[in-house]
Amino acid sequence: MTQLTNNQQEEAGDSQLEAELWPDEVEYYGPPRPKYWLHIMLFVLTFIMAMIVGARMQENFLHHQPLFIGDLHYLSLNWLIRNPKMIWMGLPFALSLLGILLAHELGHYLLCLRYGVDATLPFFIPAPIPAGTFGAFIQIRSPFRSRNDLFDIAIGGPIAGFLVAVPVAAWGLAHSLPVNNELTPAWMEMRLGVPFSFDLIDYCLQWMNVVPPHQYMAHYLYFHPVAIAAWVGMLATMLNLLPGGQLDGGHILKALSGRFHRFGTLLTILILIPLCWKYWFGWFIWAVALWITREHPPVIEYPKLKFSRKILALAALCLFILSFMPAPVVGGSFPELKEEVSRIIASIRQ
């Protein structure tokens, strides 16, 4: 009787798992045909929505008005009906935002093609919100064949999106305005947190004399709409790199250590709960999302993750830190939200 070594047992277990994931006796018909019309329609609708929102923001920016938060009529189309040509003012915002989101999703999609993983083209989600969209995603319809494949596909999106977001942010910050007495009311209505990357980019712009030096960093700038597009891109990078569930950060964690993935997901959820209370209620939604997706699909353990990819994992951590914002929307903590709801209810009763 032959007793398997630990490595042989692990390899045998991997072979059994691989046989379950890709059984030889299952008749394979190939991936379903892409619904090009659906991808094109969603992209066009998202682009139009971003154009409308961007045009409104550009109009408000030129007149030193609140860009979108606090502007209850940012989606009112009366101004656009009176002057339809104004929609072209939203082109810089729409191109910047969709360029960042498209780069992120293509970073995933092209690597799926490289590794033979069946994935859809990007789905864009138009929405009547200040950004004009809830983002984009691709649907992966086949298993990952190795941890290395999983890692590359997961990290490809954040890196590609961040590389596009940085020059967009540099242009947007260079055309933003330092806050003065005239701009203070509009700036206070903006109520956006600022990622560390914005401060770093703004510092570099001042160091290179692209913009005149000012006393404060990016937090005290009245953002140009293109800077808002970069901000949304940084927000998407931060959220996708949360280390848990089936987000990009969760896939990276699973590729690094299958055993640690579940613990890392639970730890992230525990960290998000106090952040939700103190800084931003939206963290609660993401904590729930991580809990729902805490079980990751199985991935073959061998071959082990290459050392170069472990170095890239540190790069992903740096991207997360550079894009991190404890309070993406200032004043959105649970106590502040509760107080605002109470105020609204009291005003209704009166």
Image (cartoon, helix red, strand yellow):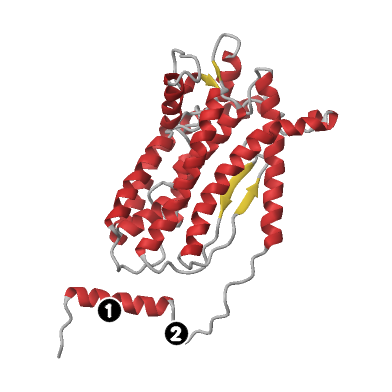
Helix, strand or loop under label 1? helix
Mark 2 and mark 1: span between their CA atoms? 17 Å
Q: Is residue 93 left or right of residue 21?
A: right
Q: Residue at x 48, y 68 (%)?
A: 116
Q: Is residue 59 left or right of residue 105?
A: right
Label 2 vs 1, first from the N-terminus: 1
Where is residue 193 drawn, in percent x and y? 48, 29
Residue of label 1? 12
Q: Is residue 82 above or below residue 296?
A: above
Task: Point out the residue furthest to the right here.
Answer: 82
Mark 2 surroundings: few (<14), some (14-19) or many (≥20) residues within 10 A: few
Where is residue 150 drawn, in percent x and y? 40, 61
Q: Residue at x 43, y 32 (%)?
A: 197
Mark 1 surroundings: few (<14), some (14-19) or many (≥20) residues within 10 A: few
Q: Quadrant of residue 189?
A: top right
Where is residue 217 drawn, in percent x and y? 44, 20
Q: Quadrant of residue 60?
A: top right
Residue 24: assigned label: 2
Whether residue 284 is visible, yes or no, is no
Q: Is residue 302 above or below residue 286?
A: below
Q: Nearer the viewer, residue 17 or 318?
A: 318
Q: Disc 2 marks which amino acid?
A: Asp
